[in-house]
Image: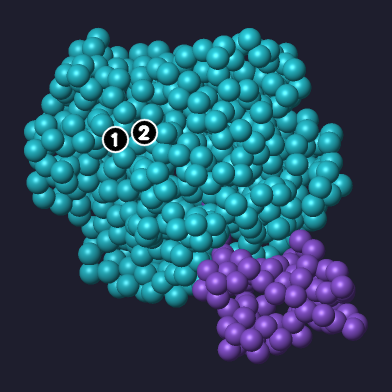
Chain colours: A cyan, B purple
Amino acid sequence: MGKIYEYSVLRVNLTNGEISRENIADERVKKFLGGRGLGSKILADEIDPTIDPLSPENKLIYASGLLTGTAASTGGRYMVITKGPLTGTIASSNSGGFFGAEMRFSGNDIIIFEGKSEKPVYLSIKGEKVELKDATNLWGKKVNETTDQLQAEFGNDQARVSCIGPAGENQVLFASIMNEKHRAAGRSGVGAVMGSKNLKAVIIKADEKQVEYYKDEMMKVVKKQTKMLKEDGVTGEGLPALGTKVLDNIVNSTGLYPSRNFQKSTFDAVDEVSGEALVEKGYLQSNKGCYGCPIRCGRDVKLPNGRSGEGPEYESGWAYGADCGVDDLNAVTEANFICNELGLDTITAGTTIACAMELYEKGYIDKEELENGPELKFGSSEAILYYTRQMAYREGIGDKLAEGSYRLADSKGHPELSMSVKKQELPAYDPRGVQGQGLNYVTSNRGGCHVRGYMISPEVLGVPEKLDPQELKGKPEWVKIFQDLTAVIDGIGMCLFTSFALGADDYNEIVNAGTGFNYTTEELLQAGERIYTLERQFNLDAGIEPVEDILPARFTEEAISDGPQKGVVSHYKELLPEYYQLRGWGEDGRPTAEKLQELGLK
Amino acid sequence: MSIKVKFYSLFRINLKSAGTEFEVEQPVVISQIIKWLDEGYEGYFSKKLLDKNEIRPGSIILVNGKNVLHLNHLQTRVNDGDTVTLFPPSAGG
């Protein structure tokens, strides 16, 4: 298709089957980058933010990043953007693997799905041939089965498949969209929106690579950055060897590793479920990489029972392990495999079971409600496997679990036992022990999340420099910069893990080399701020009020009870006013007219 | 009584050891512990943890769960009964 700064858009109307093409060749690409930025701009322009996320009026946007499919290191990522059914906020979920690059190769930089098909369909892109096809015989099939069957029908096992499993079909509010079987656009329920549209899958095989960029200029920068990634201790050695699960022992040793639905902040049995254990027990077969990736943090794992797959990553392993009090790595990994096959977000699935366990142990869920299922007790391997299947199929109490922990706990009269922000569950870091991360959780535009500004990096890991996790001074500014830089990386289509070795200037250098945009680093970061503010404004327009910038009461009213951080609570409320001010938002948490004007959002 | 040293990440995997213990008569500083470990492992610990006699960016040295960068860096004192936890540069998410 066109130059890299021209986005080729495929628009698929599922209601009437019409497929059309358009180009975005104006300043929107430069202002919003690609991926999360441009996709969010399109969504905000085209839908009414107050609609029901599972109605035909919602749109589902697949967006490749600005440098996706180019030679950029890790440049293979795509984003799925929609209004999310779990939170009611804008939802954008990122995935790696090879699908994003194939989208770009095929000349479909963005695909917009609108309306709702009468019967199950999938989108087939074979070179220039684009068709909606009947998916009736795929409906009900797992992610792995769907992928295999589609590739077989397509006649090419190198075709890339992005699809939903039964959880997406059943509109589980935290259903994922999976590509290459194991890579997930995991969070915020993008898979439920896909299911609500009767769209089962997208399969793509490009004839030729239709990606245009300034190759010579870019290759010089790529060479330099690949060397930086390979020589860095984190991206060149730690992540390839141990994957993200290197974090289990770091976070546990520093007393920030939530267990039993955040009732404790360390886990006694961490050695049984850690990244080191995955190696020592012999489950890890090899590491794997996504498109263009020199880091290769993926885990190719085989269990003693012969089952194999990818994972668990740190968050997934924690959600089903420590947060459910389960010390059985075999069961934790199996639960991860089930999530991948059925198409569930591992974080919300595991933590919703953890919440259900606390509700059950406190007597708020009756035994009768479990019908013949295992008791929802912390530490039960049987329970995590059983209820994961139940929630995907909405069977028994699984129908309530499928709504996520907030709606579950609220239905039992105890919403305070859901460890979530804006109804999306928190990831694996206790915010009481890392003050910047707490602020980041409450201001994330898609609710509880660790990939909207990963303050763990400076506050715990010491990258790019070590901050005292309990210090409040300066944290709002760090949070803002991290959030804006993350939005940039998500717009570019590179992996967030590159940021352990690369800084803002490096991203600017590669963007300029590939596109000729001639940004300054400040301008690039302002594009990140623009994306962040656009998302915030969407959420406000959707009726998500700033009073929801709030952590569960547990984190401000109950001090950490164990480990090195014993005695601390979160002070995020003291940081919010300064954060709003730095963002150019009013004291009421709303972007001011001046700020919207400055960012070109009005 | 003794000082317990825990190895994680590449230390644990590459050295095939979960850690060691040192008997001490009086408190010692972190840099001394690294020297003792180097003697047993051919300088591997200072290679991973240090850069020009400072703590290498991204390396994590904890005393009882507190990062020594917020205590007294390599001069942080370690007492009998304390636990030292060591990670080479590590991150994820």
Residue nearest the viewer, comparing A273 with A72: A273
Instruction: Tally the numbered discs.
Output: 2
Q: Position of residue A127 (x, y in %)?
A: 10, 40
Name, please, the residue furthest toward the right.
B26
Do the residues marked 2 and 1 share a common chain?
yes
At 42% from the left and 18% from the top, the residue drawn is: A393
Q: Position of residue A566 (x, y in %)?
A: 84, 49
Contact (CB < 8 A) between labels 2 and 1?
yes
Q: Is residue A517 left or right of residue B90?
A: left
Q: Please say if A130 is above or below A248.
A: above
Q: Position of residue A540 (x, y in %)?
A: 58, 25
Residue nearest the viewer, comparing A332 with A6: A332
Secondary structure of residue under mark 1: helix
Query: Between disc 2 and disc 1, whose residue precedes?
Result: 1
Residue at the spot of label 2: A341
Q: Amino acid at mark 2?
A: Glu
Q: Amino acid at mark 1?
A: Asn
Q: Which mark is residue A321?
A: none
Question: Where is residue A508, by image quadrant?
Answer: bottom left
Secondary structure of residue under mark 2: helix
Residue at the spot of label 1: A144
User: Crowding near pointer 1: few (<14 within 10 Å), some, many (20+)?
Assistant: many
At 40% from the left and 17% from the top, the residue drawn is: A170
At 20% from the left and 52% from the top, the residue drawn is: A211
Q: Please say if A359 is above or below A126.
A: above
At 67% from the left and 33% from the top, the residue drawn is: A378
Q: Is residue B37 left or right of residue A572?
A: left
